[in-house]
Amino acid sequence: ATVRRHRWGDYASALARAERATSRTAPDPTEAGPKGGRRLSPRFVEWLMMLPEGYVTAVTGLTRNDALKALGNGVVPPQAAAALRAFIADMAEAVAA
């Protein structure tokens, strides 16, 4: 737990919850860039969105930038489900009134 806390800091408990929800360990948030620096990992973004592993990152011919663009323009399924539930509840309440 100390290593996890050190690595993720204030986000350690949120990452642990997401790992339980996805049944997958969080991938590294960064990857080596072409000049040796660190840059955002599309695999991490995909995982954060709770998408199946490889849903975007394993698409043949998709560059890293393409993957990040697709992920950035994508929908986070749990958030979409929550929004849909709220909408349905609001509509049911409106119809009942």
Image: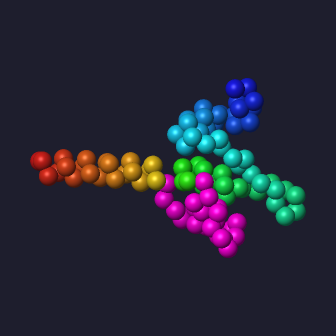
Name the quadrant of the N terminus.
top right
- Residue 94 image point, x, y percent: 17, 51
Say which of 58 and 26 sits in front.
58
Instruction: Indicate left or right for 43 with 50 as reference.
Output: right
Main secondary structure of the magenta stretch: loop
**Figure quadrant of residue 58:** bottom right
Magenta-span inclusion, residue 65: yes
Rendered position, 2 above or below 44: above
**Figure quadrant of residue 59:** bottom right
Q: Residue furthest bottom?
A: 61
- Residue 46 image point, x, y percent: 60, 55
- Residue 92 image point, x, y percent: 19, 49
Instruction: Indicate left or right for 57 with 2 as reference.
Output: left
Is residue 29 among what the camera can see?
yes
Residue shown at 82%/60% (left/top)? 33
Is residue 18 among what the camera can see?
no
Q: Residue furthest left?
A: 97
Q: How many marks?
A: 0
Residue shown at 59%/49% (left/top)? 48
- Residue 77 image point, x, y percent: 46, 53
Instruction: Indicate left or right for 40 with 52 as reference.
Output: right
Magenta-span inclusion, residue 31: no
Which region shows up in magenta? 53-76
